[in-house]
Image (cartoon, rainbow, N blue to C red):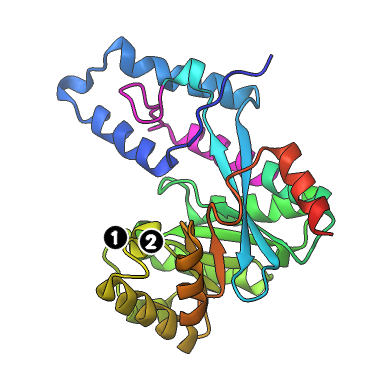
């Protein structure tokens, strides 16, 4: 029987940060409560028990489905609440690699079953411990083993990670673009980033964090900021999407500003695999 699942998954980046903070405790001490989630997560990964849900992303102008984000979920019964003290910690590089490979391969394999090469599957980069060599190898392997076209895969790079890339990582991302993989800057606006710096990344798209949309359409400052991000991104050849498009007035405002794609409750919540397949069938 499949374990119960928590409705929202924390990012592995957050888990990694917590893991590193634990490792800096005096004398490297850890409590049994600290060790338990780590061991449980390893068991979950090694038995392929993690689950992916999928959230659609639509064109604001036409309503067409353009992309689907793969969302990782933790089995709550074993790993505890995502926001509670039992958040799983993954300071182990090998475990991070196993988890990222599992998620990438599962997402590509599922997208291949849709037989919709026009719909991108978006997979978030899972953590700063993943080296550029690992990323290139994992992407190429997943595409080769599943048969998914590179153009149907989108790698989402969290903003806080993207602007700290070294030269090797930047070269690796450029290599992924060369074979046709899409690169999206995720969670833009969640941290402090420079719009000018976007020119130095081999991106195809940018996704605004839901925090940027807070206050739309009545907050004039939020409106001005969103307009600036969209216009600047378009000027350097990037499409722009936004997370957290939950209201009709919000969608209308973003469409008027020129936003390309929206993801949020106005379209669909994250869906389990079977429901995502039905969603696709209804759109045919």
> Outermost residue, left direction?
26
Q: Position of residue 4 (x, y in %)?
A: 57, 20
Please give left or right for residue 43 compared with residue 195 in the image.
Answer: right
Q: Residue at x 79, y 45 (%)?
A: 278
Q: Residue at x 55, y 39 (%)?
A: 72
**Pick the front one: 66 or 253:** 253
The residue pinned by badge 1 equals 191
Magenta-highlighted residues: 81-105
Residue 22 visible somewhere in the drawing: yes
For the residues marked 1 and 2, what is the alpha-carbon distance in whole angstroms?
7 Å
The residue pinned by badge 2 equals 159
> Outermost residue, bottom direction?
235
Q: Is disc 1 in contact with disc 2, using a CB cutoff of under 8 Å?
A: yes
Mark 1 and mark 2 lie on one chain; the one further toward the N terminus is 2
Q: Residue at x 55, y 72 (%)?
A: 174
Crowd band around label 1 with a 10 angstrom C-alpha radius: few (<14), some (14–19), many (20+): few
Q: Position of residue 282 (x, y in %)?
A: 81, 53
Crowd band around label 2 with a 10 angstrom C-alpha radius: few (<14), some (14–19), many (20+): many
Residue 164 visible somewhere in the drawing: no
């Amino acid at each position: 029987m499949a374990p119960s699942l928590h409705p929202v998954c924390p990012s592995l980046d957050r888990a990694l940060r917590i893991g590193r903070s634990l490792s800096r405790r005096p004398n490297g001490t850890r409590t049994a409560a600290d060790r338990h989630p780590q061991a449980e997560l390893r068991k979950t990964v090694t038995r392929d028990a993690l689950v992916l849900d999928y959230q659609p992303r639509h064109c604001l102008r036409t309503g067409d489905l353009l992309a689907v984000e793969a969302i990782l979920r933790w089995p709550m019964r074993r790993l505890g609440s995502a926001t509670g003290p039992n958040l799983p910690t993954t300071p182990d590089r090998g475990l991070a690699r196993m988890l990222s490979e599992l998620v990438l391969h599962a997402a590509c394999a599922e997208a291949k079953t849709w037989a919709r090469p026009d719909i991108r599957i978006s997979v978030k980069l899972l953590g700063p411990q993943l080296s550029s060599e690992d990323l290139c190898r994992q992407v190429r392997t997943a595409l080769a083993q599943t048969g998914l076209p590179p153009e149907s895969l989108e790698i989402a790079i969290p903003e806080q990670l993207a602007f700290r890339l070294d030269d090797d990582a930047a070269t690796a991302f450029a290599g992924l673009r060369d074979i046709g993989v899409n690169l999206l800057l995720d969670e833009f606006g969640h941290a402090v980033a420079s719009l000018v710096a976007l020119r130095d990344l081999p991106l195809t798209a940018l996704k605004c964090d839901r925090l940027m949309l807070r206050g739309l359409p009545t907050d004039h400052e939020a409106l001005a900021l969103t307009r600036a991000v969209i216009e600047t991104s378009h000027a350097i050849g990037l499409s722009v999407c936004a997370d957290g498009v939950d209201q009709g007035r919000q969608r209308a405002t973003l469409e008027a500003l020129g936003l390309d794609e929206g993801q949020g409750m106005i379209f669909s919540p994250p869906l389990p695999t079977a429901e995502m397949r039905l969603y696709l069938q209804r759109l045919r």
